[in-house]
Amino acid sequence: MEGKTIDYLINEQIRDREVRVIGAEGNQLGVMSLKDALAAAEEAEMDLVRVSPNAKPPVCKIVDYSKFRYEMMRKEKEQKKKQKIVEIKEVRLSPNIDVNDLNTKVNMARKFLSKGDRVKVTLRFRGRELAYVNQSKKVLDDFAEKLSDISTVDKAAKFEGRSMSMFLAAKH
């Protein structure tokens, strides 16, 4: 068994006095004592499974437990398939970057954004470059401006240690 499937209480594991019972065909059988619900499940030659423990009274369903578990695992697998994991890609720049180099980095970031990833643009300062932090912010602004057609600034430029970084996310 993979993933984090929810463990359902079945038959004698259920300790509630009264439960709302849903029949094998999906019809409501109403609120009854646990003893009566177990008897109804046994009569149908199926299991009594507690599907909603937080309800008042808890909801139990009369189903074939192994088939029910298989269906739940399949649903969970389908949901995982549809899930898109957003990665953060980093593009590093220097304060005295040339126009052509900047365009190359912009194209790289454009490719990442088109795939749906977020882009972290980092401007690294070395040595005396730290004295010109304010002028260097213009490089990040130009970068964001060139990608403004397909992205938005997720987190504005922020100075941390010897680098300044901002995050870009694709427009929806």
Image: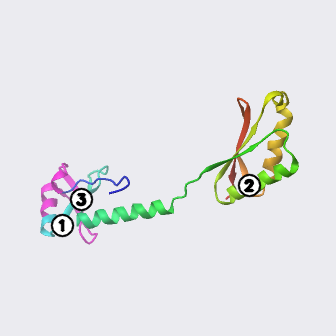
Whether residue 1 is visible here, answered yes or no, is: yes
Amino acid under label 2? Met
Q: Residue at x 64, y 57 (%)?
A: 116
How far, Cα to Cα, is label 3 from label 1?
9 Å
Q: Which disc is residue 170 wearing?
A: none
Asked which secondary structure carries label 2, the reply is helix
Q: Nearer the viewer, mark 2 or mark 1?
A: 2
Q: Quadrant of residue 120?
A: top right
Whether residue 132 appears in magenta in the rendering, the answer is: no
Residue 79: where, in percent of width, then height?
A: 45, 61
Q: Nearer the viewer, residue 165 or 61?
A: 165
Location of the C terminus by quadrant is bottom right
Q: CA distance from mark 2 to mark 1?
A: 58 Å
Pointer 3 local density, CA inside 10 Å: few below 14, some 14–19, many at least 20: many
* Residue appearing at x 12%, y 68% in the figure: 43
**Residue 139 higher or lower than 13, as above or below:** above
Span of residues in magenta:
11-39
Which residue has dot 1 on it? 46
Horizontally, residue 132 falls left or right of residue 84, namely right
Determine the image quadrant of residue 129.
top right
Q: Are marks 2 and 3 in contact (CB under 8 Å)?
A: no
Residue highlighted by disc 2: 108
Residue depth check, mark 2 versus mark 3: number of the one nearer the observer = 2
Left or right of residue 158, residue 52 in this image: left
| Amino acid tagged 3 | Val
Q: Which residue is disc 3 drawn over?
A: 49
- Is residue 32 in the magenta section? yes
Regarding mark 3 in the picture, which secondary structure is present there? strand
